[in-house]
Image (spheres, grey):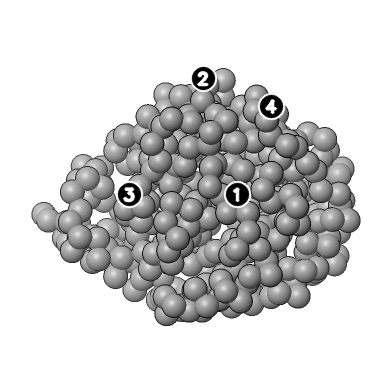
């Protein structure tokens, strides 16, 4: 079987034997890549047409109790200039976003326990009351099941929690051996059980990652059935232990996006900011490889540069909500178009 056969088989059966995934990930020619992306576009268009969903990202706190080795806002980074947005500031971001056409708000932050369940629920209820036609996505890390239940009851709809690597040794290696993938997977299972549209994901090219790990992640995603998959290249941050590690590649990331689209036709798949950081046209290429979501930043300008998970993360330009017009034009250059819609998972 050659790679074209593998791609067609993946499209038809929505999964491949492990050995074929590994072969595909390691031996794609330029022609194979183009074929993969064309199939992925065809599948995404059969489900979502030409529409691209935009999510308004509100980075509301860069405090974090955890110490993930790859992350610029890890607790040990004493050079990180920390901030928290107040509930009022978050509501202002949402108002600006709504006027700009956003119908999903993504509340993203480190694991900042200053935001108690009560406080999180007050923020979520405020957003739900103020903008009832919008979806509310949380990306705030690991909490107890009861906390997740409270957020859902308060009106949150979606939750992003990248699993980072389903391979225990690799997961431990990314987290200084302090965290367990079991906890992560329990959180993901809880979130899905509760009724959240749930997102998992990985960094492509993270330190220590092998092709076997990537295949494990694909198999996990197939089995778990996430509504969203967040996947961008690993990019080192200067104030982390991984500062000297090489970044993940554009090609490997695009391959994974194309494969995930064929494996899960209805999945919501962002062309990530990280992809747009390693190459200026990265997000457009992501859309052309099967992605259908972009997440511009709605956080107040003065805080954006402080939320640096990796080096080179843009703090101005297209990340500014005021530049949504520019973003629309970029998306349109791919033949797709940004729409004002909640953009729920097609199967929900
Ligand atoms: S990746 Fe998330 S949990 Fe880990 S240090 Fe960064 S913000 Fe905290």
Which of marks 3 and 2 precedes in the sequence? 2
Viewer-proximal residue among 72 and 292? 72
Which of marks 4 and 3 precedes in the sequence? 4
Asked whether the beta carbons under mark 2 and mark 3 sit within 8 Å of each other, the answer is no
Give how far apart the Cα atoms at labels 4 and 2 are: 21 Å
- Is 105 located above or below residue 338 in the figure? above
Q: In this rendering, which labeled residue sits more in front, label 1 or label 3?
A: 3
> In the rendered image, which residue does mark 3 sit on?
252
Asked whether the beta carbons under mark 1 and mark 3 sit within 8 Å of each other, the answer is no
Callout 3: 10 Å neighbours few (<14), some, many (20+)? some
Which of marks 1 and 4 precedes in the sequence? 4
> In the rendered image, which residue does mark 2 sit on?
177
Q: Is residue 299 left or right of residue 310?
A: right
Instruction: Please tell me which residue is depicted at 27% across the width and 63% down the height of the picture.
Output: 36
Viewer-proximal residue among 172 and 246? 246
Numbered disc 4: secondary structure: loop
Give how far apart the Cα atoms at labels 2 and 3 are: 26 Å
Which of marks 2 and 1 precedes in the sequence? 1
- Is 332 located above or below residue 196 in the figure? below
Which of marks 2 and 4 precedes in the sequence? 4
Callout 4: 10 Å neighbours few (<14), some, many (20+)? few
> In the rendered image, which residue does mark 4 sit on?
78
- Is 22 located above or below residue 304 in the figure? above
Numbered disc 3: secondary structure: helix
**Residue farthest toward the left in the current orientation of the protein:** 1
């Amino acid at each position: 079987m050659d790679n074209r056969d593998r791609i067609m088989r993946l499209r038809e059966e929505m999964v491949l034997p492990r050995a074929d995934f590994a072969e595909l990930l390691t031996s794609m020619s330029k022609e194979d890549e183009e074929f993969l992306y064309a199939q992925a576009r065809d599948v995404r268009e059969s489900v979502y047409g030409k529409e691209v969903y935009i999510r308004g990202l509100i980075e509301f706190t860069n405090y974090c109790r955890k110490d993930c080795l790859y992350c610029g806002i890890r607790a040990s980074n004493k050079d990180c200039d920390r901030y928290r947005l107040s509930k009022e500031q978050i509501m202002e971001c949402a108002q600006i976003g709504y006027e700009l056409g956003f119908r999903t708000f993504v509340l993203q932050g480190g694991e900042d326990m200053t935001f108690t369940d009560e406080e999180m629920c007050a923020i979520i209820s405020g957003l739900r009351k103020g903008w009832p036609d919008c979806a509310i996505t949380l990306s705030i890390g690991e909490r107890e099941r009861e906390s997740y239940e409270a957020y859902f009851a308060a009106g949150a709809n979606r939750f992003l929690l990248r699993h980072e690597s389903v391979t225990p040794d690799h997961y431990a290696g990314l987290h200084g051996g302090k965290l367990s993938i079991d906890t992560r997977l329990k959180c993901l299972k809880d979130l899905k059980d509760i009724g959240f549209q749930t997102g998992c994901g990985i960094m492509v090219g993270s330190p220590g990652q092998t092709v076997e790990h990537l295949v494990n992640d694909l198999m996990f995603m197939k089995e778990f059935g996430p509504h969203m998959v967040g996947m961008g290249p690993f990019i080192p941050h200067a104030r982390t232990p991984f500062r000297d590690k090489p970044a993940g590649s554009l090609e490997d990331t695009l391959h994974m996006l194309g494969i995930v689209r064929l494996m899960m036709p209805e999945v919501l798949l962002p062309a990530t900011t990280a992809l747009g950081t390693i190459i200026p046209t990265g997000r457009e290429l992501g859309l052309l490889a099967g992605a259908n979501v972009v997440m511009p930043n709605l956080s107040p300008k003065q805080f954006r540069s402080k939320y640096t998970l990796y080096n080179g993360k843009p703090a101005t330009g297209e990340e500014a909500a005021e530049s949504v017009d520019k973003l629309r034009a970029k998306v349109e250059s791919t033949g797709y178009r940004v729409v004002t819609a909640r953009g729920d998972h097609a199967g929900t």
